[in-house]
Every structure is written in structure tokens, then in C-alpha cells.
Image: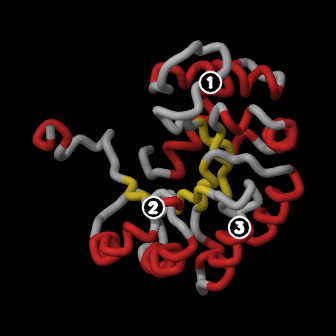
């Protein structure tokens, strides 16, 4: 498989450590420092400061944050504010479950903030309101497969072909045409991950 993907510019790497497994991933820090990633993601507070320092040095590298503190992201925001230059990074808030007020607080410090929309993001009224009111030019469509099966998709694991379910639900929430919204979201993803 490696030979099939080497050199294919459509395939990019994002390395992450799930917040619940960060302690077990400490041995990966030297690897994270030297790897040529397209993004860093799913990092807990312990690793976040080190990765932020690396991302600031590499300036164009987006950071994918998975906030496990009830959706507010306060721990991550605190880390970001402590690293000089980190507030200028492109931040992808993975699987948004925060409220309008929480998003607005993040935006005060992070001018390059993008909100990741998954099936979970569309399940709470607080995050639904945030997604309804937020500029579509700052949204990213996500799956979080094999978890978080979208509404109306039935039983079983979440898979890439169910992304259309999330798109249709988001478009309905926002009162937008799914096709037109898909174009905007695709452009956002290409911009954030340098796939233009």
C-alpha cells in the first residue's frame, strides 16, 4: 500500500494522539517533531504545548484540536495562548460540541479558526445554534469514522460514504442548498490543508 500512496498529492498525513491515550503516546514526541505532517491532531494538554511550538516554527501547519472538556475547549485554548505565535495558526476545532459563546471566545484569540462538523455536532441544541450562526466559510465537514454514525444512516460503523448525511443535515439546519454548501466546505478543506 505504501508504494500506492507515495507521491500521490491527494493523500496527506495528519498525526494525532487521542486525548484519552496521550500518556501512552509520550514516546512518540521525537517522531512528531521530525515528521513532515499536513497537520497535527487529537492532542491532549500534556503534548499540546510541545506540538504547538513545532507548529509555530513550521507556521503553515494546521492544528486539529479535539476538546474533551465538555466541549468548551478551555484547556486547549489556555495552551494555545501560552505559546508565542500560536494564536496565528490555522486551528481546526474537531467535532465541535461547543456553544455560540464558546466559539466566540475562541474567535477572539484565534482569527484562523475553523469548526469541524460531525454527526455529534448536530445532536445538541447549543452546537446546532453555533453551526447555524457561523460563517460557512469557516466550517469543515468531518466523519470521525468509525464512530458517530449520522442521523438516518441506520446501524453499523460510520464510513466515508455517509459524509453526505452530515452535509444534508447541516444544509437543512442552515437553510442552504446541499450542493452549494458542499462547494464551500470543499474549498475550506482544500485551503486549510493546502490541497488547492
* Residue corresponding to mark 3: 110
Q: Which mark is residue 150?
A: 1
Q: Nearer the viewer, residue 166 or 138?
A: 166
User: 10 Å neighbourhood of mark 2: few (<14), some, or many (≥20)?
Assistant: few
> Taking 17 as reference, is 140 above or below it?
above
Query: Which quarter of the image is occupied by the C terminus?
Result: top left
> Taking 96 as reference, is 29 above or below it?
below
* Residue corresponding to mark 2: 21
Q: Position of residue 141 (x, y in %)?
A: 59, 36
User: 10 Å neighbourhood of mark 1: few (<14), some, or many (≥20)?
Assistant: many
Q: Nearer the viewer, residue 109 or 95?
A: 95
Which comes sooner in the sequence, label 1 or label 2? 2
User: 10 Å neighbourhood of mark 3: few (<14), some, or many (≥20)?
Assistant: many
Q: Position of residue 88 (x, y in %)?
A: 62, 72
Which comes sooner in the sequence, label 3 or label 2? 2
**Disc 3, SS:** loop
User: Do the residues under discs 1 and 3 have CB atoms within 8 angstroms?
Assistant: no
Name the residue at the left extreme: 3
**Disc 2, SS:** helix
Left or right? Give the position of 175 relative to 40. Answer: right
Determine the residue positioned at 17% across, 45% down: 6
Marks 1 and 3, how far apart in space?
Answer: 29 Å
Amino acid at each position: 500500500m505504501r508504494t500506492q500512496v507515495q507521491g500521490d498529492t491527494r493523500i496527506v498525513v495528519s498525526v494525532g494522539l487521542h486525548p484519552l491515550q496521550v500518556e501512552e503516546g509520550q514516546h512518540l514526541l521525537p517522531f512528531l517533531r521530525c515528521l513532515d505532517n499536513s497537520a497535527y491532531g487529537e492532542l491532549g494538554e500534556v503534548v499540546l504545548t510541545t506540538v504547538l511550538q513545532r507548529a509555530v516554527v513550521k507556521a503553515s501547519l494546521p492544528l486539529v484540536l479535539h476538546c474533551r472538556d465538555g466541549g468548551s475547549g478551555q484547556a486547549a485554548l489556555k495552551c494555545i495562548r501560552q505559546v508565542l505565535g500560536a494564536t496565528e495558526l490555522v486551528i481546526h476545532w474537531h467535532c465541535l460540541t461547543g456553544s455560540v459563546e464558546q466559539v466566540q471566545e475562541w474567535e477572539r484569540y484565534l482569527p484562523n479558526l475553523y469548526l469541524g462538523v460531525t454527526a455529534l455536532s448536530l445532536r445538541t441544541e447549543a452546537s446546532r445554534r453555533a453551526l447555524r450562526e457561523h460563517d460557512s466559510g469557516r466550517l469543515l465537514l468531518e466523519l470521525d469514522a468509525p464512530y458517530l454514525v449520522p442521523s438516518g444512516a441506520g446501524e453499523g460503523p460510520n464510513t466515508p460514504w455517509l459524509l453526505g448525511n452530515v452535509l444534508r443535515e447541516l444544509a437543512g439546519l442552515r437553510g442552504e442548498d446541499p450542493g452549494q454548501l458542499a462547494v464551500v466546505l470543499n474549498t475550506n478543506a482544500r485551503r486549510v490543508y493546502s490541497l488547492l
